[in-house]
Each structure stands twice: as structure tokens, then as C-alpha cells.
Amino acid sequence: MTTRIKEYSVGELARLSGVTVRSLHHYDAIGLLRPAHVAANGYRSYGRAELLRLQEVLFYRAFGLSLNEIADVLADEADAVMRLRAHRDRLVAQAEEAARLLETLDRTIATLTKEIEMSDHDLYAPFDAATQTAYEDWLIETYGPDMAARIATSKEAIAALPKGMAGAMDALKAIEARLVDAFQVEATQAELDADLAAHRALISRFWGEDCTPAAYVGLADLYLSHADFIARYERLAQGFSRWLPKAMKAYAAEIST
């Protein structure tokens, strides 16, 4: 005896998911969520695969992505498990960052209400040098002992810049702000290429050596693999942590030809 797979009408799926019938019709029209079957009378029916796809759409909507951005995510060649794992990593990174900030925020409030005393150093605990040390340790563990020498070279190069680390971070923030603008307003290819060229040139200055196209791709992969980078770029703009590495890889491919 075979088990019949349950299918839902558009109205039933709307009641089950909380998504309006009108939205489901719109998702169908833009190709985001096609029904499993459309009867001769136009009635739509949705099976298990469509329910899972709708759930994935809702995950990304809750994260703040637009429908166009969600369509781009779903068009990725990665399967659903890989996409959801990557999304989970982004949410975990966000949650961890929020937890660190909330802990310091609670302690600050408790200090202001005279419940505890908080040292000047503790005011900046989520942002201190220990974070940089932990990051360097992670790089060496991930990429091997040669990374220690590269980190030392990078520190020397940054120290030699006119305004040192503070100036380097200001320059990076300015370029990242332009890239966020490019992400949000869909800049022209020429504008985006100029911003990415400036970004790659600044990375070369940070490293004290040329950031080759291959190295730029490697940096993009690093941005995708470390929770702190994901959290940092999601604070700048939701969806930016995924968009930036993709743009970097496309630019690297373009200048390699």
C-alpha cells in the first residue's frame, strides 16, 4: 500500500504558514515558489517540497532579505542543506555578537544604577585587543604556522601607515561604507569595480604585499567562514555578509582574464 503525499490548496497553505493567499500568488508570479500542480481550472496545489521551500523563504524574510535577494539565494547552486547551514552560521554569529553586547549593556546599566562597579577597561570589553588576538590565533590554527609570519608582516605594514592602525581602520570603514551603498542601491558595474579595486588596494597595504586575484578570492572565503566577519558585515547591512564575498570573487575573476 502506497502512502499518498498530502497536497495543500493555496488557501490551506496560507492558513498553515500564515502567508496570505495574495503573497503566495505573488511568489508564484515571480518564480519564487511555484505550486507542484496547477489544475485545468487554475487551482494550485503544493506538496512537501514546496512547503520546505516556503519555509526557507520565510527564514530569509525574517532575516530581512528582500524577495529579490531571496531569489538570488535560492538560485545558488548549493543545495538546501548547504544554504540553510550557511544561514544558520549567520544567525549564530549574530546571536553571539548580540549576547556579548547585551552582557556589557546590562553591566553598564547596573553600574549606572549603582548596583555594581565597572572598570574603564570593562566598558569596552566586546571591542578590545583580546578579540584581535583570538582572531590571529584562529588564522594560524586554520591556515598553518606560515600565517604567523604573514600576520607579523601585516602589523609592520599597518604600523608604517601615516596614521597607523587607527588610520587604517578609518580608511577601511570609508571603503566599506561605499560598498554598502553599492549593495543597497545596486550601483553600476563601473562604480562597483572602482570600490572593489580600492578595497583590494587597501588590503594590499594592510598585508604589506600584493593582494593577488587568487588571494582576494581566499579573503572572500575567509569572510564567509568566520563568524566575526559575518556578524561585522551583517551589522553594516543585512545580507551584506553574503553579497560582499560574491562581489569580491566576481571582481577577482574579471581582473584575472
Image (cartoon, grey):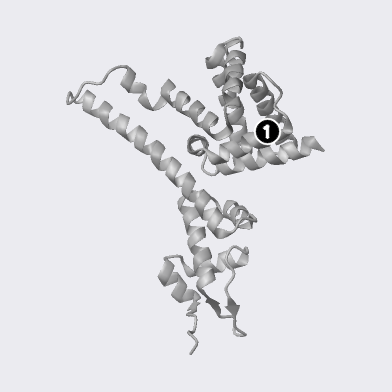
User: Looking at the picture, how far across and down is residue 230, in whole percent?
Assistant: 51, 39
Q: Residue furthest bottom?
A: 1
Residue at 68% of width from left, 30% of height from top?
Answer: 195
Image: 247 above or below 71: above
Please, what secondary structure does the residue beneath circle 1 have?
A: helix
Front residue of 90/193: it is 90
Q: Residue furthest right?
A: 257
**Which amino acid is tagged 1?**
Tyr
Q: Which residue is mark 1?
A: 216
User: Looking at the picture, how far across and down is residue 243, in whole percent?
Assistant: 61, 43
Image: 123 above or below 28: above
Residue 107, picture quadrant:
top left
User: Looking at the picture, how far across and down is residue 101, in whole percent?
Assistant: 36, 33
28 left or right of 3 in image = right
Residue 202 in view, yes or no: yes
Instruction: Count all numbered tags in the image, as a single digit.
Output: 1
User: Looking at the picture, how far across and down is residue 4, in whole percent?
Assistant: 49, 84
Mark 1 is surrounded, within 10 Å at the Cα level, by few (under 14), some (14 to 19) or many (20 or more) other residues, namely many
142 left or right of 77 in image = left
Image: 168 above or below 240: above
Residue at 62% of width from left, 53% of height from top?
Answer: 72
Residue 157, picture quadrant:
top right
Front residue of 108/10: it is 108
Q: Residue furthest front?
A: 145
Image: 179 above or below 32: above
Front residue of 92/22: it is 92
Residue 23 in view, yes or no: no
127 left or right of 40 in image = left
Image quadrant holding the C terminus, namely top right
Residue at 52% of width from left, 75% of height from top?
Answer: 47
Residue at 33% of width from left, 22% of height from top?
Answer: 123
Q: Residue furthest left?
A: 115
